[in-house]
Image (cartoon, rainbow, N blue to C red):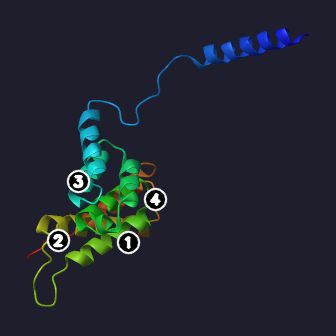
Amino acid sequence: MGTWSYSVAAFVGALALWAMGGTEREKLVVAGGSVEPLRALEASVAADGSDAVRARRLAQAYLDAHHPGLALALIEAAPPAVQSDVRLRHIYARALLDQGRNERALAVESGVVDACRPRTDGSVPTVCDPVLLASALRRTAILEELVTLGIHDTLAHPEASLVAYRNATRQARVSLQ
């Protein structure tokens, strides 16, 4: 075979690979009607990555769109000042829980509870409201049960997860501030 034959064979091979690959476009990471609001939030965070409020909104939007991995990536790449935001840490714990990282989620959520505890003088940190504290206490109790039972993936073990949830919520807790 001559040089011309090799060139034709290579061209035909490349053409065959292209035809087998198809012309389908790449799929969106986040599909559905929630793309445009996410784009706006992403642009907002890109404009000012040091704003914890913007980061919280985007991380929560990722969780609402069932993409906890994106929320984790956002929070873990944020500047330390943003990462230390108590409300963002609460969202971070939820993303960790959704990813099956229950022990780490418990550690983060316990930190949120500690940050929201009343001080020795009786005052409460201004970043914590009763709803945040109640939610963090409830999630901490559930995570403690999940970790105790050795459950990492709540979707893979729905019966055991339900037992953990029932054990954790059996007692009513009230947060008075």
**Image quadrant for the C terminus?**
bottom left
Residue at 26% x, 67% y is 85
Occupied quadrant, residue 174: bottom left
Marks 4/1: CA distance? Answer: 14 Å
Q: Residue 24 location in percent, x, y?
A: 49, 19
Identify residue for label 2: 173
Answer left or right for 145 relative to 120.
Answer: right
Label 3 CA crowd tier, 10 Å (few <14, some 14–19, many 20+): many
* Along the viewing direction, whichever of 177 and 41 lies nearer the viewer: 41
Relative to 113, 108 lies left or right: right
**SS at mark 2?**
loop
Instruction: Determine which residue is flagged by label 1.
Output: 107
Position of residue 9 relative to residue 52, above or below, is above
Task: Tell me the distance, in whole angstroms, between the alpha carbons under discs 2 and 4.
Answer: 25 Å
CB-based contact (under 8 Å), mark 4 and mark 1: no
Residue farthest to the right, as pictured: 1
Q: Which residue is mark 4?
A: 152
The answer to which quarter of the image holds residue 20 is top right
Label 3 sits on a secondary structure element that is: helix
Residue depth check, mark 2 versus mark 1: number of the one nearer the observer: 1
Q: Nearer the viewer, mark 4 or mark 3?
A: 3
Residue type beneath disc 2: Arg
Kindly report which numbered mark, 4 or 1, lies closer to the viewer in this rendering.
1
